[in-house]
Image (spheres, helix red, strand yellow):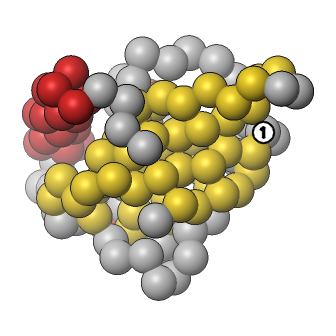
């Protein structure tokens, strides 16, 4: 499944936790969970770049949020995407959403998720 949207500013919580995310609106029909993904964006008129990513779909229940959203953590990426259009291709569901008891538990799980994503992309390459 591919989801396209304009990256908007949010609370910046992902960045504060060490996992900066690009946030776009998500269709209600997308199942909640954490996905391995590829994120595409045009930084030049004629060139689309693709980046291995982790995509979170759902509400950040650990922080008491109820609104469903799509947050994309792009591996090894440090460009500004605010106001730019991106396309996120969900490849494979890694896990369901979890409400963590603490921010520390969340960060620990995020580190494990990143390791799993790196292993996947090292094994299978930049999958489309």
Residue drawn at (36%, 38%) of the image: 127
Residue 88: x, y in percent?
Answer: 53, 50
Tell me the SS state at disc 1: loop
Is residue 102 toward the left or the right of residue 16 in the image?
Answer: left
Do we see residue 96 in this rendering?
Answer: yes
Residue drawn at (23%, 59%) of the image: 93
**Most distant residue in the right direction:** 45
**Most distant residue in the bottom direction:** 29
Residue 117: x, y in percent?
Answer: 22, 34
Q: In the rendered image, which residue does mark 1 sit on?
A: 84
Is residue 115 toward the left or the right of residue 92 in the image?
Answer: left
- Name which quarter of the figure residue 64 lies in: bottom left
Residue 25: x, y in percent?
Answer: 63, 64
45 and 57: which is toward the camera? 45
**With respect to residue 81, does 97 lie above or below?**
below
Residue drawn at (21%, 21%) of the image: 122
15 and 116: which is toward the camera? 116
**With respect to residue 89, does 27 lie above or below?**
below
Do we see residue 20 in this rendering?
Answer: no
**With respect to residue 91, does 65 lie above or below?**
below
Q: Residues within 10 Å of mark 1 (few under 14, many from 20)?
A: some
Is residue 20 toward the left or the right of residue 35 in the image?
Answer: right
Residue 5: x, y in percent?
Answer: 70, 56
């Amino acid at each position: 499944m591919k989801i396209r949207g304009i990256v908007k500013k949010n609370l910046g919580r992902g960045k504060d936790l060490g996992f900066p995310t690009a946030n776009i609106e998500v269709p209600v029909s997308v199942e909640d969970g954490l996905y391995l993904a590829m994120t595409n964006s045009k930084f030049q008129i004629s060139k689309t770049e693709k980046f291995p990513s982790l995509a979170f779909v759902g509400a950040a229940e650990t922080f008491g949020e109820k609104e469903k959203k799509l947050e994309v953590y792009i591996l090894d990426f440090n460009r500004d995407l605010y106001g730019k259009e991106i396309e996120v291709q969900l490849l494979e569901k890694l896990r369901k959403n979890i409400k963590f008891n603490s921010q520390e538990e969340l960060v620990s799980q995020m580190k494990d998720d990143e390791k799993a994503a790196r292993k996947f992309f090292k094994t299978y390459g930049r999958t489309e």
